[in-house]
Amino acid sequence: MAVLESEVEIACEPPRLFGFVNDPANRPRVSPPNVNVELVEAPDAFSEGARLTFVVQAYGQKQRFLHEIVEWEEHVGFTERQVQGPFAKMVHRRDVVESPRGTKLVEQVAFEPPGGLLGFLLTEARIREMLGDGFRHQHRELRRLLEPST
């Protein structure tokens, strides 16, 4: 599987950052505006075994995803796995780590591009580009929403 890693330091306490990323309702708030994320069904907060259904509209196409939390540890991190969706496989790990500036969010996405006709459009390179753009936007939004204003 292809792997993409990302990290950002946020000037806030670890429980605050963990609480934010652990709340599914915040996912659309930090998603890029050109990727319309709509929650269809979601728990109030993630926990092991929780499922999240959402629709992503990008490039004129709507894709439905069903993800399940397969590992979860309070204030530390969680792993979600695609159960249904366009990718052949996708696993996304988020860890919240104390850092000199406050807190670091470390993310790792392992994926296999889809097969069939969709695979011609969503190549590994294209997925890396889209995820990278998404991470950069998310980092800006996390800082804007969670760091104290100066």
Image (spheres, rainbow, N blue to C red):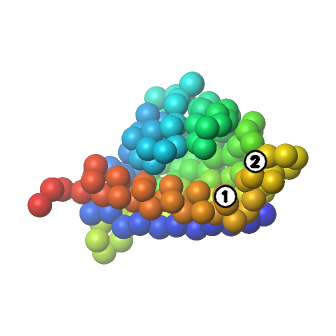
Give me the residue at 68% from left, 53% from top: 91
Q: How many marks?
A: 2
Give me the residue at 18% from left, 56% from top: 148
Label 1: how many residues lie within 10 Å, few (<14), some (14-19) or many (20+)?
some
Residue 21 lies, with reference to residue 96, above or below; the image says: above
Give me the residue at 41% from left, 66% from top: 8
In the rendered image, the quadrant that contains the C terminus is: bottom left
Residue at image mark 1: 127
Give me the residue at 42% from left, 56% from top: 137
- Mark 1 or 2: in front is 1
Left or right? Give the position of 24 relative to 144: right
The quadrant in which residue 51 appears is: top right
Q: Residue furthest right?
A: 116
Q: Earlier in the sequence, mark 1 or mark 2?
A: 2
Q: Residue furthest front?
A: 60
In x, y percent, where is residue 97? 43, 65
Label 2: how many residues lie within 10 Å, few (<14), some (14-19) or many (20+)?
some
- Could you tell me if the residues under marks 1 and 2 are in contact, i.e. CB atoms within 8 Å? yes
In x, y percent, where is residue 130? 59, 57
Amino acid of disc 1: Ile
- From the viewer's side, name the closer residue of 59 and 131: 59
- Residue 97 can be seen, yes or no: no
Amino acid of disc 2: Phe
Left or right? Give the position of 15 relative to 22: left
Q: Residue furthest bottom?
A: 100
Spatial distance from mark 1 to mark 2, Cα to Cα?
10 Å
In x, y percent, where is residue 85? 73, 39
In x, y percent, where is residue 5? 58, 67
- Residue 136 can be seen, yes or no: yes
Q: Residue furthest left?
A: 150
Residue at image mark 2: 87
